Amino acid sequence: MLDYEGDTHVYIQIADILRERLSSLAAGSPAPSEAEIQQEFGVARTTARRAVHLLREEGILYTVQGEGAFVGPPTGGPRQKRKTPLYQQIATKIIDQIKAGEISPRRPIPGESALVKEHGVARETVRRAMALLREQGWIYTVAQRGSYVSPKESWPED
């Protein structure tokens, strides 16, 4: 339980909690992401980032650009695979809905706000999912209108 009224900064309290949890994990194990810390503790991204930075400075974890944070020093053994990134999970769910016929070609997919609310993620995460879907040919975007399912002939081959 975080003490918001006490004399210890919230990010230090979070770092203390994470330090305790991470001590039981093997080197190379994935550490919680900033987004996971934000969600669990109900704090701003900067607070989560400061907690991770403190643990990184102490050598308790290290970060790899584009992959996340891991337990131990950077030379501490092979990294374990992280779960599929949230934006890819969202994109996969939309692809499954398209394939199942739940969203028809040339019909709108749910908007950014709806997807943010549905998945409990940051707007940027939803934008990355939509960018991936556009790159793969599943959707197209019309300015001031939204994103729509591409015609079936534009879908990528399985």
Image (cartoon, rainbow, N blue to C red):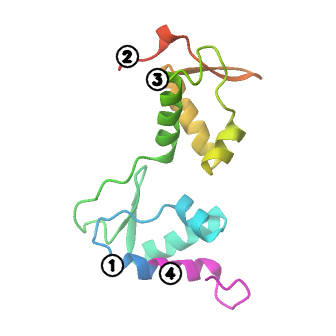
Residue 24, numbered label = 1
Give the vertical position of 146 relative to 52 (above or below).
Answer: above
The extreme left residue here reads 77
Residue 58: horizontal and vertical position, in percent?
Answer: 42, 79
Residue 38: horizontal and vertical position, in percent?
Answer: 60, 64
Residue type of the residue flagged with mark 1: Ser
Residue type of the residue flagged with mark 4: Ile
Which residue bears the numbered disc 2?
157
Q: Residue at x 63, y 82 (%)?
A: 2
Q: CA distance from mark 4 to mark 1?
A: 12 Å
Q: CA distance from mark 4 to mark 3?
A: 41 Å
The extreme top residue here reads 153
Which residue bears the numbered disc 3?
136
Which residue bears the numbered disc 4?
17
Q: First in sequence, mark 4 or 1: give its number.
A: 4
Mark 4 residue element: helix
